[in-house]
Amino acid sequence: MHTTTLVRPSKAKVLRPPRKAPRPSTTDDQGRSHQLESLMRLMTLETGKAIQFEIAAHPDSKVYIAGSFNNWDPTTHPLHHHPEDGVFKATLLLPAGTHEYKFVVNGVWHCDEKCPHRVPNAHGSHNSVVHI
């Protein structure tokens, strides 16, 4: 005689990926953005200052700022064109101290014509200087 054994399926739990947390509302984003701005203002008061740099150049130009604050790298800090003012601008948070800098427009180094402070450099020209 042949016997058949019935096997019942176990009641194992089905594993599902964890649910994603809901995205915070726009109101939460605005609150966090305000908190971040307040923190940046506080940090600026204690450790440095936000400085706006600007230079007039042809709208199609590639404009950067290089200086002692970025190891004179001519490609890390781009300035953005503001057609309403006809200038390129960037705002950098610089630590307290003295910083030398120059603009790089289409690969050519320029002093900041609006900055009255300059020092001679090792290349026989001058660097602009900002004191914070």
Image: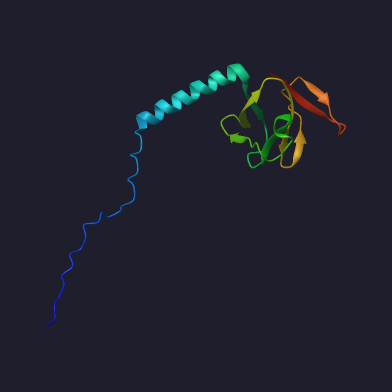
In this rendered view, identify the residue nearer to me: 64 or 96: 96
Please identify the residue farthest to the top as the structure is shown: 45
- Taking the spot 72% from the left edge, 37% from the top edge, the residue there is 104
Please identify the residue farthest to the bottom as the structure is shown: 1
Position above or below: 118 against 87: above
Residue 73 placement (x, y as % from top left): 72, 38
The picture quadrant where one finds residue 53 is top right
**Colour theme:** rainbow
Q: How many marks?
A: 0
The picture quadrant where one finds residue 1 is bottom left
Residue 84 placement (x, y as % from top left): 56, 31
User: Is 61 left, or right, of 22 in this rendering?
Assistant: right
- Taking the spot 15% from the left edge, 70% from the top edge, the residue there is 6
The picture quadrant where one finds residue 10 is bottom left
User: Is 70 left, or right, of 34 in this rendering?
Assistant: right
Residue 8 placement (x, y as % from top left): 17, 64
- Taking the spot 64% from the left edge, 42% from the top edge, the residue there is 60
In this rendered view, identify the residue nearer to me: 53 or 86: 53
- Taking the spot 63% from the left edge, 35% from the top edge, the residue there is 79
In this rendered view, identify the residue nearer to me: 83 or 64: 64
Please identify the residue farthest to the left as the structure is shown: 1
Q: Quadrant of the C terminus?
A: top right
Please identify the residue farthest to the front as the structure is shown: 1
Residue 99 placement (x, y as % from top left): 73, 25
